[in-house]
Image (cartoon, helix red, strand yellow):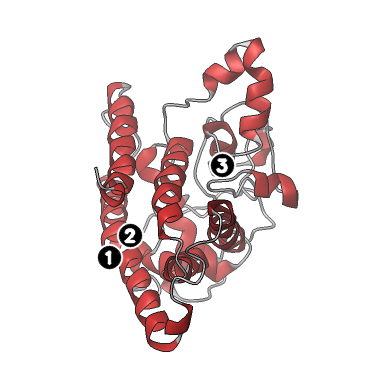
């Protein structure tokens, strides 16, 4: 089978398997998701891979070909390990920084908040973000440059691996539990949980408050590699899972406002999405507080 087709099929199969296991476990039949939440998840799951990502890649490659055509396939013959390192740094590391920035900057948080206001985990949570969050994500633009420079072959392996790991880290299946259950697997668990994102470490990021001793809402930002959190001191590893998820500014606006902000703003003055800047904007220094709708 053509590698490009395989690269696209692997994440789809992973999504179906993980989603199927979650459905068997009852997640989608007795959950806390509203129709608004489901709409956000399905729209994001559709728009990102079919419109936003292809449009960015096409634009970057077109522009590079127009203005920097002499650099086309410049690194096509270099060792694949250099290609892999380029994607890990220019895509995954920049995504870590972008993600971290979205928890430290009030405006960026508004673009990222759809990912956190949902009150339970699941594979469909993976790509809940405002469209503009992805439209300006540095890693997507750098990826276009790397493809233009001749790193397409590695990208076709890198992308499905990354997407599968990220979806599995959000999944209700909690696949890492067996690593913690058996003592002889603990050394392997130690390596894995410090290398890639796992349900335990990423669930902690989605936890409502660090007061539970498990959650780390302003940390554990890693996407493919959790190593970045280890390196930059934002990691928290407990091998446990939070019981409460969400965000303290949890007002749930209609799906089109959450995804289209700031192009479309909320008409409710109680919402932080009513303006670019409000007096109720998210404060990253506060781990948790009650928010009355």
Relative to 156, is 216 above or below? above
User: Image quarter for residue 30?
Assistant: top left
Whether residue 254 can be seen here: no
User: Image quarter for residue 26?
Assistant: top left
Specify which label sits upstream in the sequence, 3 or 1: 1
Residue 35 as seen in the image, left or right of residue 252: left
Specify which label sits upstream in the sequence, 3 or 2: 2
Which residue is identified by label 1?
A: 51
For the residue labelled by badge 3, is the local secondary structure a helix, a strand or a loop?
loop
**Image location (x, y in percent) of residue 264:** 33, 74
Mark 3 is surrounded, within 10 Å at the Cα level, by few (under 14), some (14 to 19) or many (20 or more) other residues, namely many
Tell which tag, 3 or 1, sits nearer the viewer: 1
Instruction: Report how far apart the C-alphas of labels 3 and 1 lie in the structure.
Output: 32 Å
Whether residue 176 can be seen here: yes
Quadrant where the C terminus sits is: bottom left
Relative to 205, is 4 above or below? below
Q: Nearer the viewer, residue 56 or 24?
A: 56
- Mark 2 vs 1: CB contact within 8 A: yes
Q: Which mark is residue 277?
A: none
Residue 142 as seen in the image, left or right of residue 252: right
For the residue labelled by badge 2, is the local secondary structure a helix, a strand or a loop?
helix
């Amino acid at each position: 089978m053509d590698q490009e087709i395989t690269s696209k099929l692997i994440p789809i199969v992973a999504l179906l398997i993980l989603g199927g296991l979650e459905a068997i476990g009852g997640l989608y039949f007795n959950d806390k998701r509203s129709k608004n939440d489901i709409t956000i998840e399905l729209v994001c799951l559709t728009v990102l891979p079919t419109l936003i990502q292809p449009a960015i890649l096409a634009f970057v490659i077109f522009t590079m070909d127009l203005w920097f055509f002499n650099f086309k396939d410049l690194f096509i013959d270099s060792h694949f390990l250099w290609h892999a390192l380029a994607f890990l740094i220019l895509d995954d590391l920049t995504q870590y920084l972008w993600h971290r920035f979205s928890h430290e900057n009030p405006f960026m948080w508004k673009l990222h908040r759809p990912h956190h206001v949902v009150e339970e985990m699941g594979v469909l949570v993976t790509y809940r973000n405002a469209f503009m969050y992805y439209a300006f994500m540095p890693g997507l633009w750098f990826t276009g440059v790397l493809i233009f420079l001749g790193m397409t072959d590695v990208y076709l392996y890198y992308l499905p691996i990354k997407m599968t790991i990220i979806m599995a880290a959000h999944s209700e299946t909690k696949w890492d539990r067996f690593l913690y259950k058996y003592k002889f697997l603990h050394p392997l668990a130690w390596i894995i949980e410090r290398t890639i994102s796992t349900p335990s470490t990423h669930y902690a990021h989605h936890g409502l408050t660090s007061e539970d001793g498990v959650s780390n809402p302003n940390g554990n930002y890693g996407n493919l590699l959790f190593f970045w959190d280890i390196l930059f001191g934002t990691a928290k590893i407990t091998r446990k899972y939070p019981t409460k998820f969400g965000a303290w500014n949890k007002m749930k606006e209609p799906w089109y406002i959450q995804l289209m902000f700031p192009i479309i703003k909320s008409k409710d003055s109680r919402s932080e999405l009513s303006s670019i800047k409000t007096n109720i904007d998210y404060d990253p220094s506060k781990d948790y507080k009650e928010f009355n709708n």
